[in-house]
Amino acid sequence: MDLPSGPLPPGSPQQVSKSRFKAQALELFRQVEASGEPLVITDHGRPTLEVRPYRPARPDANPLEELRGSVLRFDDPFVPVGENDWEALA
């Protein structure tokens, strides 16, 4: 079952059903490769998989540098945390 046709919001990837993907996989792979845009595979209208072009990591990229600054430090980890301190609850 394909999602209803019509314009997708700008920047959203193209979506196809699993049955269409099964029938046209090679053509869709070529399309993703040529366009560089991801493709979302749906199951009964729900996104289940994403196919995107392979982009190798830069040879000089350091994975630890990507994470630098993303870890919080707690000086006293046993102090209770209030609800206002949780970003997910805000």
Image: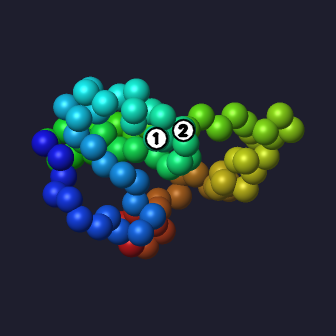
Residue 10 position by quadrant: bottom left
- Image coords of residue 87 (percent x, y): 46, 66
Nearer the observer, 89 or 18: 18
Nearer the observer, 45 or 73: 45
Identify the disc placed on residue 41: none
Image quadrant where one finds the N terminus: top left
Identify the residue under disc 2.
33
- Is residue 31 placed above or below 90 in the rendered structure? above
- Marks 1/2: CA distance? 5 Å
Could you tell me if the residues under marks 1 and 2 are in contact, i.e. CB atoms within 8 Å? yes
- Image coords of residue 9 (percent x, y): 35, 68
- Is residue 18 placed above or below 87 in the rendered structure? above
Residue 53 position by quadrant: top right
Nearer the observer, 4 or 27: 27
Tell me the element at label 2: helix
Residue 1 visible? The answer is: yes
- Image coords of residue 11 (percent x, y): 45, 64
Identify the residue under disc 1.
31
Q: For the residue marked with disc 2, what is the amino acid? A: Glu
In this image, 53 relative to 48: left or right? right
Nearer the observer, 58 or 86: 58
Tell me the element at label 1: helix
